Image: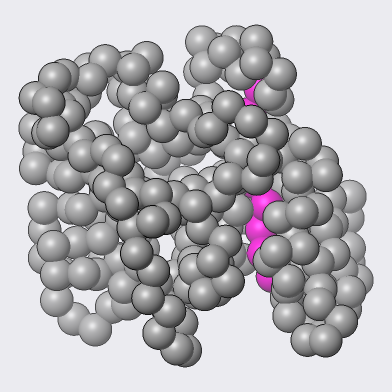
Amino acid sequence: MADSDDEQAIPGPTGIQLTQLTTGAPVGSSELVDLYDYPANNEICLRANMIGSLDGAATVAGLSGGLGGDGDRAVFAAMRANADVILVGSGTARAERYHGAHLPVSVRQRRQARGQGEVPVIAVVTASGAVDPSIPLFNESEVTPIVVTTASGAANVASRVPGAQILVAENHLHTGKVDLRAALTGLHSRGLSRVLCEGGPSLLGTLLAARLVDELCLTVAPTTVGGDGGRIVSSPTEAPTAWQRVLLLADGDGYLFTRHVRA
């Protein structure tokens, strides 16, 4: 689920009825944020949040927002409420017309009380540095975005988005590619340990292949799409990963919300 132009401010869970399917218990708005909290330590924890249809499609007409609903937006907001940084591929940021994060006052106060910034920063991953300076993320964000790139890409970013925060993360044995492990270390050194990856499929595939994803949260939309659209993960080779489910929610519209930790 992406922060698209049509959803500049993602609504909270007020008025959305979610239920824990394992217990049958309803989930209130404050409890929802707690259910998606991160471990209480300063270690890097990377959570990925994606949405897919019943037949495995990750998008409708090329965008993930076409699969979403009110319950999905509430869960999406709860995850953002806890994150220090939101990691997203440059292609997804461009296609979904990303904005900076928007959070209500109550969530900002909660974050301040636990030593977080009022809103999470967006970190865009691009090896080439070819970010789109016209998207709202680079013009309307409350917190200056971080661009994670290579040494050669850094100059491209600086020319396109003057004043952008740039994090160079490159493995000298594989020049021209972003070293995502080094990127996470660099984010951690900036005090950003609670990481939320919102895709796209290529970025998630690379993170999974490197075994850098600690949690995978998947919204299953009650729809089929057909066509030849991609899945939530795209990678050139298979990288099987075992997961253990720790949370299963549902809403009245038929959406399922799963949270898994790496086994």
22 in relation to 55, above or below = above
Residue nearest the observer in this picture, 92 or 22 = 22
Residue at (38% x, 56% y) in the render: 263
Residue at (21% x, 69% y) in the render: 56
**Quick check: 181 left or right of 102?**
right
Does 125 lie within the magenta span?
Answer: yes
**Quick check: 73 left or right of 191?**
left
Give percent across and percent down for residue 171: 81, 77
Q: How many marks?
A: 0
Residue 141 visible here = no
Does 149 lie within the magenta span?
Answer: no
Looking at the rendering, the stretch of residues picked out in magenta corresponds to 118-126
Residue at (58% x, 27% y) in the render: 40
185 in relation to 125, above or below = above
Q: Residue furthest front?
A: 263
197 in relation to 127, above or below = above
* Picture quadrant where residue 159 is located: bottom right
Give percent across and percent down for residue 4: 45, 49
Give percent across and percent down for residue 189: 83, 44
Residue nearest the observer in this picture, 221 or 62 = 221
106 in relation to 81, above or below = above
Residue nearest the observer in this picture, 65 or 50 = 50
Residue 234 visible here = yes
